């Protein structure tokens, strides 16, 4: 006797897509700049985080942050439903 079953495994590649604006430079006359992340699609079920140039996570979970420190910032977006993420 023999029995078998076939199952189909579906993929949910619903990747969040993010881009960042090109901010102005910090100068003697401009001591802060705004970084703005732009998302393609819905922001439902997304987790947002910013990483500062020193590698520490910032407490801000908004699409916009104001900073007075120069350096490279990382924006990370995570789809909490399927675990897919994007960063820039």
Image (tube, grey):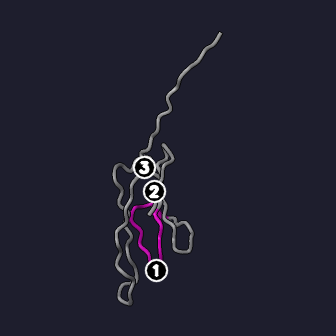
Marks 1/3: CA–CA distance: 29 Å
Tell which residue pokes out farthest to the right in this image. 1
| 20 shown above or below 85 | below
Mark 2 falls on what kind of element? strand
Front position among marks 1 and 3 = 3
- The dot on residue 86 is 2
Q: Which residue in the structure is indicated by mark 3?
A: 15
Mark 1 falls on what kind of element? loop
Task: Tell me which numbered mark, 1 or 2, is placed earlier along the sequence.
Answer: 1
| 23 shown above or below 18 | below
Based on the picture, tell me whether residue 64 belongs to the magenta stretch: yes
Q: Which residue in the structure is indicated by mark 1?
A: 70
Task: Tell me which numbered mark, 2 or 3, is placed earlier along the sequence.
Answer: 3
Locate the C terminus by quadrant. Answer: bottom left
Marks 1/2: CA–CA distance: 23 Å
> Which region shows up in magenta?
60-75
Percent across and percent down for residue 11 are: 46, 38
């Amino acid at each position: 006797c023999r029995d078998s079953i076939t199952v189909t495994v579906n993929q949910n590649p619903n990747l969040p897509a993010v881009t960042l604006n090109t901010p102005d430079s910090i100068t003697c006359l401009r001591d802060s700049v705004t970084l703005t992340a732009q998302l393609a699609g819905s922001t439902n079920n997304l987790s947002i985080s910013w990483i500062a140039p020193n590698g520490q996570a910032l407490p801000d979970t908004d699409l916009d942050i104001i900073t007075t420190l120069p350096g490279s910032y990382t924006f990370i977006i995570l789809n909490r439903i399927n675990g897919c993420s994007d960063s820039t």
